[in-house]
Image (tube, helix red, strand yellow):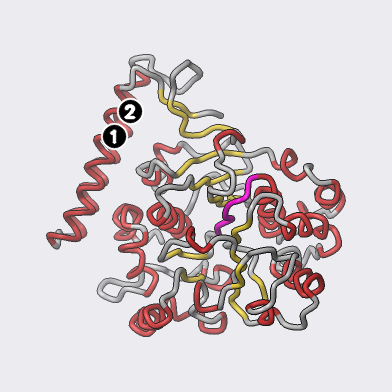
Amino acid sequence: MAWKFKRPVTTAIIFLCIVILMATMIYNSRHEGADFATLNSELQIRMDELAQAQEEAEENNMEFDELDDEVKIFDELDPNEVMLNGDMFFFVSSGAQDLNSREACTVEAAAQLHPGRHIFVLFITPNITNIIQSHTLSVLLSYNNVIFRYIKVSKYLRQNIYLEQWFIESGFQESDQMPDHLTNALTYAMLNKFGGTALSFDVLLLRSISWMGDILPRCQDDLIESTPLTLKSKHPLALDAMEQMVHFHDSTNPKATGSYLLTQRLKKKCSVEFITELLFKECGAKSDAKVLTSEVLCPVEEDKHWRIFDPARTKLVLQNLKEHKSHGLKLWREYTDSYPSWGSAGKPTAFSSLAQDACPLINLRVGSINQF
């Protein structure tokens, strides 16, 4: 389904005005100490006005269908939209039709930090929720570099005969770990085709990573993380990973085709015993990709994941981020998805404190009603 605004663009003009008002509210909240509840109430009014504008457009036969000179807000990904080696991708590989608030926060953070790059949010189904009515997607439309698209999975996984073999024979669709395996496969396929950065809903970016070039992130000394991963198109590591998916697949282990695959292949191809050796050793398999230290994106260790969402540990986590000058914060979703991110009144978590700057519009839209 393609959602599009027709022209003449009366609706688009109204939408632009609302976006400007939302941005103004953010600015005023930071510089004038505006009351949070009041701001959130005003933002709800603005979103209601946007929904009303949509209804009025439909009443005037300005419906969401196909016409020339239109503004697409959701459609199948057109390869011509993607800037080679320059854009960023989030994969909604679970088949979900919407984003929850924490996921939307990671998207907004990436969009704010990388205004010169497209931030593609890629669904695997064309049947998603009504974007204008979504509490999260509608807010993300405020950023002109956030683009919602869907992809036909088979179209991208069949670009390599080995990856196609995995797609057909592995039975990943029947596994509880299907979203993770599919995200790994799409990461390798999309980076091989387009280059750029495969982002993760599990990492809240706090600083731009675009200046780093190709990167291989770590959260543990001897393990490469599968996202965020930045590689140039046709990078040897992406090509090798696609070929190895079928050999590393383990339906019970979501890391098998991700961090384990990348780590073991780099060790073998670079003839090293430990990944830390690649901090100083050149290797054709990693080309010019930079192996990051764990503090860059994972300043909170796996066994201390709970601190991110514990109001009693907020100052400790924020101080840790400051000391390490971290560029992001891994959220450890496999453990923390059920945690209340926002904390209770007067007791903010580290995540909710960071969200005020990292994702201000999502923060205003849903933070006060505890939908994180």
- At horizontal 56% and vertical 40% (from top left) the residue drawn is 82
Quadrant where the image shows the N terminus: top right
Q: Residue 359, relative to residue 331: is it above or below? A: above
- Place residue 5 in its image quadrant: top left
Horizontal side, residue 239 vs residue 109: left or right: right
Q: Residue most toward the left?
A: 32
List x then y, in percent, for residue 222.
68, 80
List x then y, in percent, for residue 335.
56, 73
Count of picture labels: 2
Helix, strand or loop status at disc 2:
helix
List x then y, in percent, for residue 332.
55, 71
**The disc label shown at residue 16, or none:** 1
Q: CA distance from mark 2 to mark 1?
A: 6 Å
**The disc label shown at residue 199, or none:** none
Q: Are marks 2 and 1 in contact (CB under 8 Å)?
A: yes
Helix, strand or loop status at disc 1:
helix
Q: Is residue 293 magenta?
A: no
- Place residue 241 in its image quadrant: bottom right
Q: Residue 97, relative to residue 338: is it above or below? A: above
Other-residue count near label 2 (Cα within 10 Å), few / some / many at <14 / 14–19 / ≥20: some
Residue placed under numbered mark 2 in the picture: 12
Task: Check disc 1 and give the amino acid type.
Answer: Leu
Horizontal side, residue 236 vs residue 298: left or right: right
- At horizontal 44% and vertical 38% (from top left) the residue drawn is 131
- At horizontal 55% and vertical 57% (from top left) the residue drawn is 199
Which span is picked out in magenta? 194-199
- At horizontal 48% and vertical 60% (from top left) the residue drawn is 211
Other-residue count near label 1 (Cα within 10 Å), few / some / many at <14 / 14–19 / ≥20: some
List x then y, in percent, for residue 124.
63, 43
Q: Residue most toward the front?
A: 282
Task: Check disc 2 and give the amino acid type.
Answer: Ala
